[in-house]
Amino acid sequence: MRAGLTFRRRATAATMAAAVALPALLPVASAASAQTYPSKTMRLVVGVTPGGAADFTARVIAQQLQEALGQSVLVDNRPGAGSTLAAETVSRAAPDGYTLLLSSSSTHGVAPALYRKLGWDALKDFTHVALINTIPGVMAVNQAVPAKTVKEFVALAQAKPGGYLFSSSGNGSAPHMMGELFKLRTKTDLGHVPYKGSGPAVVDLGAGAVQVMFDGLPSLLPQIRLGRVRALAAMGSQRSTVLPEVPTMTESGYPGIEGGLWYGVSGPARIERRMVEVLAREVLKAVSSPETRERFASVGAFATPLGPQEYTAFIVRELAKWGEVIRASGASVD
């Protein structure tokens, strides 16, 4: 990947070939739909409440699409069950190109492996249009924790199994899974304390109720700037442009501990090929613009433009990666 998160894990050749071939199976659009699409208001469904990285990303892209396509693009916030309810809503919508989903690391990375009963399949029930951005995770500790590096923290945690707690925005969330990945790779025993959102989780981290957290920089940055929280490592393939002094996990001696948040645009299965081409072209154009890249960079995000085939293959790798982490860690939801 050119920027943001780099995922080295490979799916099997057969699985990858099938995934990459999915867009090619979409039916060819009729001449009429190709000429008139879009001709009415579009809806971008987001599985969280207003505010935060997902809602920010959705509104940036919705505004760009509205200007490019000449039609209103409404952001429809439908929170619940780790964004899986929003995904189910879109999977059951008419494949007419007017109902879209802000697909994410939660809906199409973690949820399919974590939830035993979903009303949809991450690949078969969706048309994946484009990846928008990636927000690498950051490992941060309360200032009272004496560790100044990841290695020092691992030594402390291994010397006191269960004595250190990590907070997250909830069971099954990306911050939860990043913490489980860290535990798995470093062979540490950290207690998990789930919250109803990153806001209170970060506040308690700063107050010392928990000792460590793994989350996107937009959530942690205010407490870092207040001096209550100290960043130990970036969990992406490169250092954050917002905190360039903080090393990556690989630089810290722990390659393979990568994770974070990512967002893309998807729709129901069987959207006509021409509509997908129109959507992908405009989303990728918006993501590649200097203005959008700058807006994302201001919150520690990387614009990561990937088209339908690349995005589908990316999702396959994410499903394999987090499926392994979940199975190995025994992570579960309430």
Image (spheres, rainbow, N blue to C red):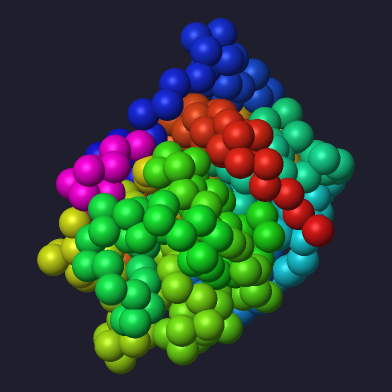
Quarter of the image with the C terminus is bottom right
Q: Is residue 161 left or right of residue 4?
A: right
Task: Tell me where residue 239 sits by quadrant.
Answer: bottom left
- The residue that appears at 22% across and 67% down in the rendered structure is 148
Percent position of residue 120, x then y: 80, 39
Q: Which residues are magenta?
A: 248-256
**Which SS does the magenta portion mostly show?**
loop
Q: Is residue 209 left or right of residue 228?
A: right
Report the front residue among 311 and 216: 216
Percent position of residue 321, x then y: 52, 33
Percent position of residue 83, x then y: 70, 59
- The residue that appears at 61% across and 41% down in the rendered structure is 329
Q: Is residue 95 left or right of residue 67?
A: right
- The residue that appears at 80% across and 50% down in the rendered structure is 88
Report the front residue among 76 and 213: 213
Is 255 included in the stretch rendered in magenta?
A: yes
- The residue that appears at 61% across and 52% down in the rendered structure is 106
Quarter of the image with the N terminus is top left
